[in-house]
Image (spheres, grey):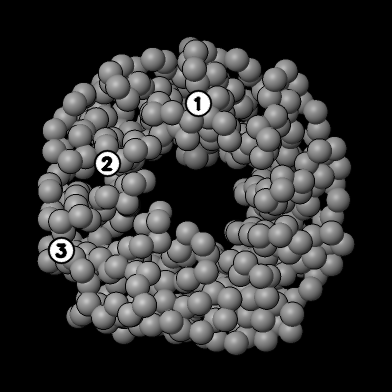
Amino acid sequence: AFSPDGQWLASCGADQTARLWDVATTTLQRVLTGHRGWVNAVVFAADGRTVITGGYDQSVRLWNTNTGRQEHLLKGHLRWVDFLAFSNDGCVLASCSLDGPVRLWDATTGDLVHTLRGPEAATRILTFSRRGDLLATAGDDQKVRIWDVRSGALLQTLRGHKGSVRNVLISPDGCAAISAGHDGTLRVWNVTTGEMTRVVAGISATNRHAIAFDPTHRLLAYGTLKHTVVLEDVVTTQPVFELNVGEAEPDLVAFDPSGRWLAVGSNDGAVLVYRLGSESRPTAPVYAIPPTGAPVWRLLFSPDSAMLASIRTDQSLQLLDLTTGAVTATLATYFGAFCLAFSRDGAQMVTDGPDHSLLLRDTRTCAVDHVLSGHRAAVTCIEVSPRDNRIASSSVDGSIRLWELASGACTATLEVQDPYAGMTVTDVRGITLAQRESLLHLGARLA
């Protein structure tokens, strides 16, 4: 995770530590030690002065970014911490685990403020309201719960889903909650009364990504099995309009950063782009990419809203120019849908390449400006710093690399040695196959 100002990069992993790296100098500044087990969650506070970690040792720890000292140890979960969320003002930290209960912490003092009991299975999602006075939680017990953050009181238990709930949003005015579940339904709730005001059936569990909010969170778009995309007003819960997208099922929907464009990707490989914001309702796409036969896997707009990238399950990538409507390139990707990022101005993009490389391309011409080589295994994630155009990439080889966008030079390799590297374990008996694989993954050699 990058700090809010882009000066720090935090990483965590199986060596039981979190590490803070100075992005400008590319040097390791702090090693945060204290967890007894894998560290699997890391997030910065809103002011960047505190970093919070959660781990398999069932603890949440707050660290001073400048000194690296642990300031607070938050304990109480019976299983490892799986998810963290800050309120918008940064005052409250919410944590959840596979043990069910959700805990609210004072982000300044580290004191446990409330333990929210009620979930009967793993909690999967935490969402604060915009004002920070409400918290919505949901998970495997098929219920959505609305909590008062200040008192810790349970305000509503929203029942109706018949499967795990993984998506929840509270409307900007705090009056409505929207949830999407694996039962194939999207449900709208009145937060005050707990009444279910709308049920939308035909949302396939495999299509849970076919739901998106516009940048203001006032419009909700979702795809249906009836081959339509519906746009609803989040505040009024009323449909604004419905788009017929043809014969294919819409797998993905996405808004551009400006909210002017809505893109729809279908399971036949087609991509439709609609223009929003005019007084008249869109009835037909402005641009369309014909079906390819391979379902659309990801849609990503450039930050300047000039280009739309679509990746399909056959690992092909197409670029659509939103000014002309022309497909400017069809490229190959190598590992997956999420190894793609645009520069902050949208002029360049980074994708994964052959031999575990990154390809830095001109977005307009698709010419390869630089081949970024160094990773020893497949690239898993690419991110651009919010502060500048420094690229961070991670890999199956366990390393994080920082690259300069202008030159393509690798400025640092952030690599932590496996905790059991160089250790030979002999006469291994009485362990399971999973335990054996864990030892090998942590660097041990088994003789």
Q: Quadrant of the C terminus?
A: top left
Q: Quadrant of the N terminus?
A: top right
Q: Position of residue 344 (x, y in %)?
A: 38, 37
Q: Residues within 10 Å of mark 1 (few under 14, many from 20)?
A: some
Of residues 230 and 333, the one drawn nearer to the viewer in this rendering = 230
Q: Position of residue 367 (x, y in %)?
A: 13, 33
Viewed as shown, does residue 237 lie left or right of 316? right
Residue that numbered label 1 is attached to: 442
- Residue drawn at x 54%, y 74% as measured from the top left: 234
Mark 3 belongs to which amino acid?
Ile
> 75 above or below 375?
below
- Residue drawn at x 21%, y 33% as measured from the top left: 361
What is the secondary structure assignment of the residue under circle 1?
loop
Closer to us: mark 1 or mark 2? 2
Disc assigned to residue 51 = none
Occupied quadrant, residue 40: top right
> 163 above or below 52?
below
Residue that numbered label 2 is attached to: 335
What is the secondary structure assignment of the residue under circle 2?
loop
What is the spatial separation of the Cα atoms under label 1 and label 2, in whole angstroms? 23 Å
Occupied quadrant, residue 403: top left
Residue 386 in view, yes or no: yes
Viewed as shown, does residue 255 lie left or right of 428? left
> 442 above or below 267?
above
Of residues 380 and 106, the one drawn nearer to the viewer in this rendering = 106
Closer to us: mark 3 or mark 1? 3
Residue that numbered label 3 is attached to: 289
What is the spatial separation of the Cα atoms under label 3 and label 2, in whole angstroms? 23 Å
Mark 1 belongs to which amino acid?
Leu
Q: Position of residue 252 (x, y in %)?
A: 33, 65
